[in-house]
Amino acid sequence: MDTPIDATALRALQAPIKESYRASPDAAIITLKAHGEIDEAKIACKVETGRAMMEAGLHPATGGSGAELCSGDMLLEALVACAGVTLKAVATALEIKLSKGLVRAEGDLDFRGTLGVAKDAPVGFKAIRLTFDVESDAPQDKLDSLLKLTERYCVVFQTLNVKPELTAVLKNSA
C-alpha cells in the first residue's frame, strides 16, 4: 500500500518545480499528445493510452455495437480522473482530511446533432454535471474552498469551461 502524502511532503515535492516555472515560464509549457490509428475494417479508432491500447467506436445510440469505448464516455472519464486527482491534491495542500471520496460526471447528449437528423440539435454535450461525494470532518467553508480550488485547478474542467483555441488539419499521405 502506498504511503499517504501530506501537505508538507506535497509542498516539498512541488516547490522546486514551481520555482523553476517562476524562473523560466516557458519551461511550464508542455505539449501533451495522444495517438490513435483508424481501424481499416470497422468504424473504430485504436487509441494508445500509455497503459494499454483502447478501441473507441460508435456509441450504440449512433449505430455502434457497444463493444468499443465511446469517446463521450472517455471524455467524462478524463474529467472524473482529473477532478479526482485535483480534489485530492487540493485537500492535501489545505490539510483537509477526506475519509471517503467519490467523483461522478454525467453529460447530456442529443444524438440527433451528431447524426445530422436535426440541424438545431447541438453536436456534443449540452450539459455536464460533476459531483463529488466526500466524507470529511472539515467545516463547510473549507469544503467550499476545496470545491472552488478544485474547479480552478482541474485541467480538464477548465478546458471544457473555457474553450481553448482548436485547429484541425487533414493530411493526405497517399
Image (spheres, helix red, strand yellow):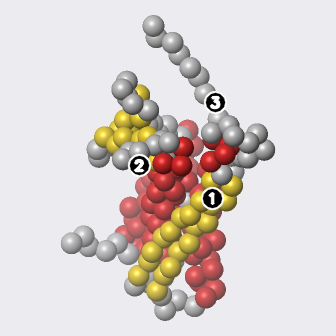
Q: Position of residue 30 (x, y in %)?
A: 49, 40
| CA–CA distance in space, label 1 to label 2 | 18 Å
Instruction: Look at the image and tell me in which quarter the C terminus lies.
Output: top left
Query: Looking at the image, can residue 123 be seen?
Result: no
Q: Identify the residue shown where x is 46% and y is 11%.
A: 173
Numbered disc in front, either 3 or 2: 2
Q: Identify the residue shown where x is 44% and y is 32%.
A: 43
Say which amino acid is labelled 2.
Answer: Gly
Q: Residues within 10 Å of mark 3 (few under 14, many from 20)?
A: few
Residue 154, quarter of the rendered image: bottom right
Q: Secondary structure at mark 2?
A: loop
Q: Residues within 10 Å of mark 1 (few under 14, many from 20)?
A: few
Circle 1 residue: 108
User: Which residue ends up furthest to the right in the rendered image?
Assistant: 120
Q: Position of residue 35 (x, y in %)?
A: 41, 33
Q: Secondary structure at mark 1?
A: strand
28 w.r.t. 171: above or below = below
Disc marking residue 167: 3
Q: Position of residue 60 (x, y in %)?
A: 48, 48
Q: Residues within 10 Å of mark 2 (few under 14, many from 20)?
A: few
Disc marking residue 136: none
Query: Looking at the image, can residue 174 be seen?
Result: yes
| CA–CA distance in space, label 3 to label 2 | 29 Å
3 w.r.t. 48: above or below = below
Residue 123, quarter of the rendered image: top right
Circle 2 residue: 66
Q: Identify the residue shown where x is 48% and y is 62%.
A: 80
Tags 3 and 2 in contact by the CB under 8 Å rule? Answer: no
